[in-house]
Image (spheres, rainbow, N blue to C red):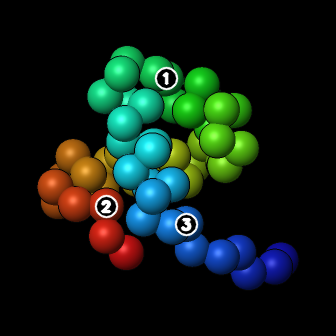
Amino acid sequence: MGHSKELSEFKRGTVIGCHLCSKSICEISLLLNIPRSTVSGIITKRKQLGTTAT
């Protein structure tokens, strides 16, 4: 299993922007070509902590 790079702050912000525009996790994942689990994690972290910082 390989190591993946951390998403940029811009890409994490784009995930949140899509979420705020009522896009589903699946739609965001397909649109930005990142795993659904990553999208879900970013959204969950934003809701719980109010930040997308790593």
Disc 3 and disc 2 in contact, CB within 8 angstroms: no
Q: Earlier in the sequence, mark 3 or mark 2?
A: 3
Residue 6 drawn at (x, y percent): 57, 74
SS for dot 3: loop
Residue at x 45% of width, y 44% of height: 14
> Picture coordinates of residue 10 (x, y %)?
45, 58
Q: Residues within 10 Å of mark 1 (few under 14, many from 20)?
A: some
Tell which circle, 2 or 1, labels the residue nearer the N-terminal end: 1
Name the residue beneath numbered marker 3.
7
Compared with 22, 16 (above or below) is below
What secondary structure is marked by label 2? loop
- The amino acid sitting under disc 1 is Ser
Crowding around mark 3 (Cα neighbors within 10 Å: few <14, some 14 to 19, many 20+) is few
Furthest-right residue in this view: 1
Residue receiving disc 2: 52
Give me the residue at 81% from left, 79% from top: 2
Residue furthest front in the image: 10
Amino acid on which disc 3 is placed:
Leu
Q: Which quarter shows the C terminus?
A: bottom left
Residue at (43, 31) in percent of width and height: 18
Q: CA distance from mark 1 to mark 3?
A: 19 Å
**Does the rendering let one see residue 3?**
yes
In which quadrant is the N terminus drawn?
A: bottom right
Identified at 31% across, 28% down, the residue is: 20
The amino acid type, in three-letter code, at marker 2 is Thr
Dot 1 corresponds to which residue?
Answer: 24
